[in-house]
Image: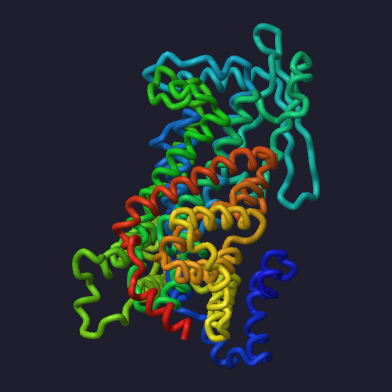
Amino acid sequence: MVTAVYWVSEAVPLGAAALVPAFLYPLFGVLKSSEVAAEYFKDTTLLLMGVICLAASIEKWNLHKRIALRMVMIAGAKPGMLVLGFMCCTVFLSMWLSNTSTTAMVMPIAEAVLQQLICTGLADSQGNSETADAPEDDSAVLDEQENRDRNQLKLIYHSNSNDRTKQELATFSEAHTGEVNGLSPKPVSNQDFIGNTNGHLSQVAVEIPNVKRVKARRDSQYPTKKDHMICKCLTLSITYAATIGGLITITGTSTNLIFAEQFNTRYPDAKVINFGTWFIFSFPIAIIMLVLTWLWLHFLFLGCNFRETCSLSKKRKTKREIISERRIHEEYEKLGTISYPEVVTGVFFVLMTLLWFTREPGFVPGWTSLFEKKGYRTDATVSVLLGFLLFLIPARRPFSSSSSSSCRNTESDPLAPMITWKDFQRLMPWEIVILVGGGYALAAGCKVSGLSVWIGRQLEPMSGLPPWAVTLLACLLVSTVTEFASNPATLTVFLPILSTLSETLLINPLHTLIPATMCVSFGVMLPVGNPPNAIVFSYSHLQISDMVKAGFGVNLIGVAVVMLAITTWGVPLFNLNEFPAWAAARNVTGSL
């Protein structure tokens, strides 16, 4: 209870609060100090370290940016398709990287696109409805836009990098008609944005609205309400997509790792949770949630006119959309041709996935069957091996000249590795490692002291409820608490309780533990719900009411889809209709 209060209130850092069992258990004679210490470093810690090595290489060599821009180029600049494109690439990246890292990587790219939409929308009020007649060469439309921009009033605010001096430059020119209809701020480059904004909207362009429109837009930085809705929809879609992507793999988010380690520790004879079985169960959930979340956000912010916002036809593209597509292409071209380190990172990425899938697929013998001793190799073995090789393999292509573009970051040292220890340290979430260890220590204390058995006896009145009702109550309770407390802390508190409840009611523990693990990630209604929410909120496109309204719908969608999964394809996959022998053995041992 002391540890849980510290976690929920965050009176001290989460990692510091997780150290409470390390000194209270030995002081009160619950566990020896050496026994408690052994709980703080488990197999999942090594798994996480290997994944972070790969994530560091992906980020260092900009492979994530190439993937994101390529997927957005495929989707196009129509608002609906643009949102879907960003959601797809965010889901894919979040499968392998942490939700927080993925959001922090994708948001600057999305913000650059949004800034381009805003800048091109300030030219005139007809830009939203006017469509291009599908010219053979898009450059004609772009030249027309540039010529019109040059004949408008511009006010550009410059701020130098050290903030010592500030100057304003105003350039006046009259249009051929003698009228000035609006402003066209100087476009903000992606490089300037990422370098100077620090996660907030850039202050490069300052708009002075037309007198005729000052009442309608004096408190807004957006050309129209529709532009503001697009900004809200896109920013929210990224944090939701990061959450959805984290559900797919066992390493996608820290809560999945916490569940896997606590489950395997409590039920060592189960042998049912691995990378393959988790992926088979969660991938359909993610796909359904992705589509339904996109539809919900589209309805909420963009309306129901899917033909206008999702058409791929060039004839229906506005000039703004054509310019935005060109901006995305320019950002992709800045990356140049794919480099040698990107190729190596991509190969390791695919190799790690294949080795995880084929270790123990279940329906056929895996590669671990080639070894004489069984049970020695886990997903962490693969993760750490490939992570170690990234420290060993040089980032420069063998037998290449020093002028090669793939070596642009390693010219000073021809033997510089793919990643360094500093690259790894910058991304390694040590606080999460300590937090997870604290959860294991708490679980060990509950088991040794007999507290888990006592809790189970108090929950016996619930034995009359069907399994689906118990699971639904657990999902609703966990998804509510996680809105106000951190996801790892919430799950660490609830997993031992739900395990004991399942054993008492003779329900397969997976029937309650897996849905609760997934629903703990649905803390999406408030900026404090999880770090990705806080990141997108810092860009100032959203208000709390927007997040609550959209997040409530996403929360309901998530709980409904998880309940659908656990009562349909989850039943044959995990044999949920029977109380398993590995849980029965644990129940008998606990009672004794």
Q: Residue 238: image x %, image y %?
A: 53, 45
In the current view of this chain or complex, which residue is farthest to the top?
Answer: 177
Q: Residue 487: image x %, image y %?
A: 58, 61
Q: Is residue 477 left or right of residue 326?
A: right
Looking at the picture, tell me which residue is in the foreground, 243 or 430: 243
| Image point (35%, 58%), residue name | 279
How many numbered callouts?
0
Q: Residue 217: image x %, image y %?
A: 74, 23
Q: Is residue 47 left or right of residue 490?
A: left
Q: Is residue 290 left or right of residue 525?
A: left
Q: Is residue 338 left or right of residue 549?
A: left
Res. 559 visible in picture: yes
| Image point (33%, 57%), residue name | 571
Looking at the picture, tell me which residue is in the foreground, 592 or 445: 592
Q: Residue 554: image x %, image y %?
A: 54, 43
| Image point (69%, 39%), residue name | 545
Q: Quadrant of residue 389?
A: bottom left
Q: Is residue 497 above or below residue 169?
A: below
Res. 60 visible in picture: no
Q: Quadrant of residue 347?
A: bottom left
Q: Is residue 246 above or below residue 270?
A: above
| Image point (39%, 45%), residue name | 287
Looking at the picture, tell me which residue is in the foreground, 444 or 364: 444
Figure coloring: rainbow
Q: Quadrant of the N terminus?
A: bottom right
Looking at the picture, tell me which residue is in the foreground, 138 or 239: 239
Q: Is residue 485 above or below residue 12?
A: above
